[in-house]
Image (tube, helix red, strand yellow):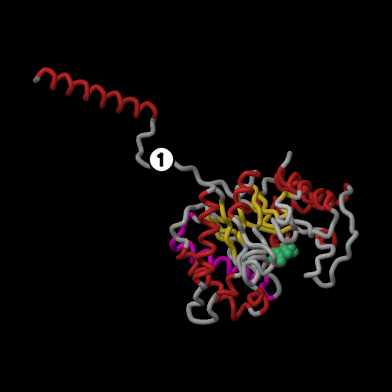
């Protein structure tokens, strides 16, 4: 019995020694496995016309889990979730956010994350901020105070975007200053959260090039591209005067114009050493589908060639890439976005 215990003891010791030496030779002794930082967004779809409508469904689209599945399977890594928080927040005091809307965004974010997708959550269509910033900047900060607390423990896959397309009275200087204040607030509890910063003048290249981003390694700069506007917005009645239908796009000079803009944006990105996201681009549905696909494909290829992640605007409703009535991708648009 004594011998047996001895032998067992020695065998155990030998096993422990073998494990220790193999652990040393594979050099992963840490209890916590090393996780490289998540790369910023590469291919992303705006789940547009849902939560930026006054109420989800008002604009003919309600987000479904199947849509997120479909995006994942098609090859997207991220969804951008535009939300009109300003229509669902108190007007004074702590600007309390509506609990039902928070629960709805939780459900979408949780589902997307269960499918290993990143989510960019933004504040969209805050038009009062653009008209009366001196009254509404504080409210936007209050909205972010609540969102930052609510999502504090969410993984890095959740990305915040402070405000969509500042314009009007939200000048370059006001936008830079507001971005910095909101970033500082989020950083109090979330030093590693990726934060997307939109720039003034509707997130255009002009606004981007004038902006002065904070120095922070977890910032993603963002801009939107819809040039030439008369082509991408032809027949878009929400815009007045509506650009007439029939503008064509696609000769060498047209492509060169985009390439030139993208080179300027890339140079700005390099100067600031921050990733740059093309947060929106797309063509309204009134243009012929082949024309839409040509422009979308060119912009997408130029974005990737310059190393920009991108988010197409949008999925359903308008600027569509997916036809929810037929439950089918609009194939030329899908191919322009994803095929080589
Ligand atoms: C706006 C949408 C618009 C799209 C293209 C977005 O930022 O929120 O209302 O359809 O840009 O113009």
* 170 magenta-colored: yes
Q: Residue at x 60, y 75 (%)?
A: 87
Residue annotated with mark 1: 33
**Image quarter for residue 244?**
bottom right
Instruction: Judge whether 239 appears above or below 269 on screen.
Output: below
Horizontal side of residue 300 vs 176, given as left or right: right
> Residue 290, relative to residue 224: is it above or below?
above
Magenta region's main secondary structure? Answer: helix
- Cβ of mark 1 under 8 Å from ligand 1: the answer is no
Q: Nearer the viewer, residue 290 or 138?
A: 290
Residue under the point 81% across and 53% down = 292
**Residue 321 seen in the figure:** no
* Residue depicted at 73% across the width and 53% down the height: 326
Query: How many badges with numbers are in the image?
Result: 1
x and y, in percent, of residue 3 in the image: 11, 17
Q: Ligand 1 quadrant?
A: bottom right
Q: Is residue 237 visible?
A: yes
Residue 336 lies within the magenta run: no
Q: Which residues are magenta?
A: 169-192
Give the vertical position of 167 relative to 269 (above or below). Answer: below
């Amino acid at each position: 019995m004594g011998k047996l215990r001895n032998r067992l003891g020695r065998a155990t010791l030998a096993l422990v020694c073998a494990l220790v030496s193999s652990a040393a030779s594979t050099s992963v002794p840490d209890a916590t496995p090393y996780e490289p930082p998540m790369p910023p967004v590469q291919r992303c779809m705006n789940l547009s016309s849902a939560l930026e409508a006054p109420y989800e469904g008002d604009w003919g689209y309600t987000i479904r889990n199947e849509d997120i599945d479909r995006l994942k399977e098609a090859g997207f890594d991220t969804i951008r979730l535009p939300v009109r928080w300003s229509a669902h927040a108190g007007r004074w005091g702590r600007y309390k956010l509506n609990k039902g809307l928070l629960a709805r965004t939780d459900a979408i974010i949780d589902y997307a994350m269960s499918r290993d997708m990143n989510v960019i959550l933004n504040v969209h269509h805050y038009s009062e901020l653009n008209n009366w910033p001196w009254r509404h900047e504080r409210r936007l900060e209050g909205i972010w105070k609540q969102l930052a607390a609510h999502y504090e423990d969410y993984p890095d896959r959740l990305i915040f975007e402070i405000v969509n397309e500042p314009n009007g009275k939200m000048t370059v200087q006001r936008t830079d200053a507001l971005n910095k204040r909101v970033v500082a607030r989020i950083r109090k509890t979330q030093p590693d959260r990726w934060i997307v910063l939109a720039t003034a003048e509707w997130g255009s290249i002009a606004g981007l090039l004038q902006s002065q981003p904070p120095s922070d390694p977890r910032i993603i700069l963002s801009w939107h591209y819809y040039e030439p506007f008369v082509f991408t917005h032809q027949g878009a009645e929400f815009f007045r005067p509506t650009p007439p239908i029939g503008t064509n796009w696609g000769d060498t000079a047209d492509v060169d114009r985009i390439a030139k803009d993208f080179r300027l944006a890339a140079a700005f990105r390099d100067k600031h050493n921050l990733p740059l996201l093309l947060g929106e681009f797309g063509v309204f549905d009134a243009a012929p589908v082949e024309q839409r696909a040509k422009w979308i494909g060119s912009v997408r290829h130029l974005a990737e060639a310059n190393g920009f992640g991108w988010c197409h605007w949008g999925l359903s409703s308008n600027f569509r890439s997916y036809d929810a009535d037929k439950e089918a991708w609009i194939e030329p648009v899908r191919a322009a976005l994803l095929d080589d």
